[in-house]
Each structure stands twice: as structure tokens, then as C-alpha cells.
Amino acid sequence: MRFRQTLVSLLAVGFMTAAAAGISQAQPAAVDSNYEAEKAAEISTAKLQLATQPGSTAVQELNEAEDTLRRLKAAKPADQRRRIAAELEMAIIRLKIAAGAGVTQR
């Protein structure tokens, strides 16, 4: 009986923790200079990965991600920055996919 109570308590705490984590992830992160630096680092990492692949064809995706990051840095209104940040997220995902696809093509 004691084991069952402990197990139920642990499961309840686990669900509450997961729910709290889900709520915190649902709230948008601040699109500030730290966010810009994090995305610049992600682009640089993908750029390095592309540089080590001979004949990579992901130049268009790289240019798109870098251009979107420049637009984000130049944008001032918060709603415009959030919209551009969403575009940047998608551009970086496409860049990572393209960079990863080059690895598997060898």
C-alpha cells in the first residue's frame, strides 16, 4: 500500500512538472540581443558544417537565414521582430535540413 501511494505521488509530481514545462514553452521567448546571438551561433554552426562538405548546394538556405537575421537586427517594433523571428526559425530549420542532407548524400 505504501509503495502504491509513493508511485501515485511521483506520477502526480511528474505530470505537474511536465505541464509547467509545457506552459513555459508555450510563452514566446523575448526577441532580444541574446536571441539574436543564439540564432547567429546556429547559423555559424550550420555554415561550418556546410564548409566541410564538398559540393554543398545549401547556399540559398544559408543566404536566406543570414538575410533574415540581418532584417531581425534592423527591425524595431516588437510585433515585427516576433514575425521576423518566426521567419528566422523556419530559415534556420531549412538550413539545418540542407546541411544535414549533404552529410547523408556521400
Image (spheres, rainbow, N blue to C red):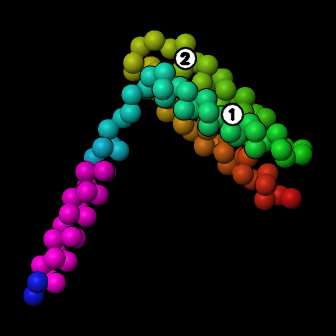
> Which image quarter is the C terminus in?
bottom right
In this image, 30 relative to 49: left or right?
left
> Which image quarter is the N terminus in?
bottom left
The region drawn magenta spans 3-22
Secondary structure at badge 2 equals helix
| Pointer 2 local density, CA inside 10 Å: few below 14, some 14–19, many at least 20 | some
Which amino acid type is shown beneath numbered disc 1?
Ser
In the image, residue 44 sits, relative to residue 15, either above or below, namely above
Where is residue 3 shown, x and y percent of the image? 16, 84
Residue name at image x 35 percent, y 44 percent: 25
Where is residue 81 shown, x and y percent of the image? 46, 21
Q: Which residue is mark 2?
A: 73
Q: State yes or no: residue 85 in magenta.
A: no
Q: Quadrant of residue 30?
A: top left
Q: Which mark is residue 14?
A: none
Q: Which residue is mark 1?
A: 44
